[in-house]
Image (tube, grey):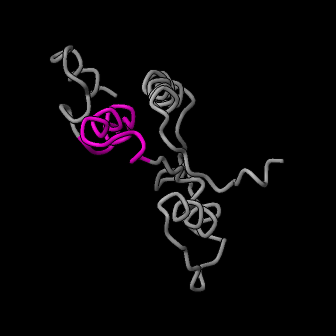
Amino acid sequence: LLRASTCESANPEEDLWPNCGTSGLFGSLYSLQLNQFLNYFSSEQIAIVRYEAYSGDGPQLLKNLASWLGLTFRRDGMTASSELDVTTYADDDGSTMSNEIRDSLDTFFNPYTSKLYSLIADKGITFVDVIEKKDLF
């Protein structure tokens, strides 16, 4: 966060991504990345896939994504369970992230998250998930 603040102060007219970095904290500024993609691709060519959807039910998500792409997905033994979503929030020494740091990260990311959702809604970008419309009704 200190690096982001320093960069933002030094270059207030520039976006943090990619001008201040493309990995770590900066690599998570998806609204800025999506906005850049829209300079090269139409919104109909872009689909958003949540990591949690893939790690929760990869085969179903890939089936839905393949359908969106006009392809056929073959499961080929892929199982629904995955170890990908196993996360621990502790450092090597067993300490956890403080609430103060979590709050600071929330404050930092909230405007970017809002911009991301606005871009998705305003541009009509496809959101691919594991839930199918037939499962909702």
- Residue 132, by quadrant, is bottom right
| Residue 129, percent from left and from top | 61, 52
Q: Nearer the viewer, residue 34 or 136?
A: 136
| Residue 26, percent from left and from top | 31, 37
Outermost residue toward the right in this view: 137
Looking at the image, residue 79 sits to the left or right of residue 21; the answer is: right
What's the magenta region?
22-46
Outermost residue toward the front in this view: 70
27 in the magenta segment: yes
| Residue 20, percent from left and from top | 20, 32
User: From the image, which quarter does the N terminus lie in?
Assistant: top left
In the image, what residue occupies the spot 49% across and 69% down? 71
In the image, what residue occupies the spot 55% across and 74% down? 73
| Above or below: residue 134 compared with residue 41 | below
| Residue 121, percent from left and from top | 52, 29
Looking at the image, residue 34 sits to the left or right of residue 20; the answer is: right
Q: Nearer the viewer, residue 2 or 126?
A: 126
41 in the magenta segment: yes
- Residue 15, by quadrant, is top left
In the image, what residue occupies the spot 46% across and 48% down? 47
